[in-house]
Amino acid sequence: MEETATAVTHLLPKSERSKYQSLLCVTFVFLLALTLAFFACAFLVLGKQKPKHILAKDSITVREVDHLKIVNVSRMWYYQSRRLVPSSENTVMQTPWLAPIVWDGTFQIEILNQQFRLQNVSVGLVVFATGEHVGFLSAFLETAETYFMQGHRVKYYIFTDQPASVPVLKLHKGRQMVILEAQGSAHPLNTYIYRMQVISYFSQWRFAKEVDYLVCAHVNIIFCHSVGVEILSSLFGTLHQQFFGLPRELLAYERQPRSQAYISKDEGDFYYSGAFFGGKVLEVYRLTKFCYQAMTMDQADHIQVLQQDESYLNKYLLYNKPTKVLSPEYMWDKELLNRQSSQEMLPNGEILVRVSKYPSSDATQDFLRDPKQGYHEDNKLEKLLC
C-alpha cells in the first residue's frame, strides 16, 4: 500500500501532492485515536465487572525483596495469663480514662522484657542525695542494682553536694553511674523547688539525648523486689498507700484557692506519691517544669502548701492523666496494706520508704533499725532484702 501511495503521489502535480500527503496524515491520526478509544472503553467495561470466584489453582507470586531480613526471636516460655477468669477480689484494674493500674500478677514480665529489649530502651534513674541524705545512697544503689530494671540499660543520675561520698559499686553490664554536683539546702521548700528545677533543666538539655525513659525516686527508698519495665509508660504515677480507696474529699490535696496546687473537693481521681514517678523524658520535663513554676509562684506569694513534694505533682496529674498507674504495692508491701503507715521512722528522725511488692524479711527490719550500718561485702545482699 505504501508503494501504491508513493506511485500515486508521483503522478499528481506538485501542488496536489502536498494536499494528498496531508490527507493521509490526518486519516492515520484519526484511525489511531479511534483505536485507542476502543481499547479504553473495553478496559473500563471489564474493570467494572467483578469476578464471580477465584479458582483454588490460581496463585499470586510475590517477589522477595532482597534487602529485607527475617528477625529471629528467641522462644519464650511462660504461664498463660488467667486474668480473663473473673476474680473474686474487688480490685480496680483500670482508671476511668482507660489507663492500666499495675498490680502484681497482671503482667507477664518475660513478654514485656522481650518487647523492650527489641526496642533497646534505656532508663534513667534520677535521685538527689544532699546533706544527711547521702547516708541513704548506699542502700538505694545496691538494691537498685539487684532489683531495678534487671537486664536493661540503666543510667543512674546522682545529684549530690558530696561527690566523694558516693559509694563505688561494681555495676552490671549496660549500667552507668553519672555523678552531678548539686546544691544542698537546709530548708525543705528550697530543696523541692531546686529538685524540680534541676530535673526539668536536665530533661531538656541532657536526659533527652541519653535515655528513653526517666524514673524519679527519693533517695530514702530501698528496692525489695523486682521493679521492671512493667512500670514504663509515657507518664506514670504511683498510688499513695495511705490514701488509696478514699473518697476525693478526704485526699490530701491542697485546698487553698490562692495556691497553684489548689484542687477543689469535687475534683480528683487518686492521690499520687511524690517518691516514685516518671515516664518519657519529654513528659517528665513538662511535669517538673510545671511543678517548679507553680512552686516559685506560691513562694513569691508566701503560700505554704500542705505537701511540698506531692501537692503540685497531684495537681499536674489531675489535668494531665498518667498513661499508667502503679498500685500501692510499689510503695507498700502486702502485709502492711491494712495498717496506718508503710513508712518506718528511723532513729535520726528520717523516714525510709520501701519500694516493694512482697513482705520484708527480718534482715530488712534490722537494716531499718540501724541504717547507718550499711551493706557489707561479706554479707549476701539477699539477706537484707525482701
Image: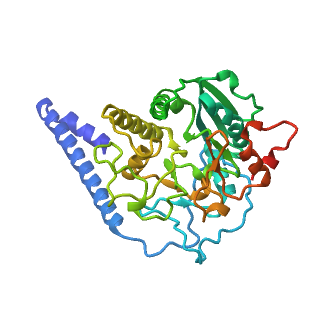
Residue that extends furthest to the left in the rendered view of this protein: 15
The answer to whether residue 65 is above or below residue 251 is: above
- Residue 325 position within the rendered picture, expressed as x and y whole percent measured from the top left: 51, 55
Using residue 47 as the reference point, say whether residue 116 is left or right of it.
right
Tell me which residue sits at (45%, 52%) in the image: 322
The answer to whether residue 119 is above or below residue 340 is: above
Tell me which residue sits at (41%, 39%) in the image: 291
Q: How is the image coloured?
A: rainbow
Question: On the image, which quarter does residue 170 sit in?
Answer: top right
Using residue 188 as the reference point, say whether residue 362 is left or right of it.
right
Can residue 374 be seen here? The reply is no
- Residue 149 position within the rendered picture, expressed as x and y whole percent measured from the top left: 67, 45
Using residue 191 as the reference point, say whether residue 162 is left or right of it.
right
Nearest to the observer: residue 361 or residue 371 = 371
Can residue 59 be seen here? The reply is yes
- Residue 162 position within the rendered picture, expressed as x and y whole percent measured from the top left: 63, 23
Nearest to the observer: residue 347 or residue 252 = 347
Tell me which residue sits at (73%, 52%) in the image: 74
Nearest to the observer: residue 265 or residue 369 = 369
Tell me which residue sits at (65%, 38%) in the image: 348
The answer to whether residue 30 is above or below residue 98 is: above
- Residue 271 position within the rendered picture, expressed as x and y whole percent measured from the top left: 46, 55
Nearest to the observer: residue 92 or residue 219 = 219
Q: How many marks?
A: 0
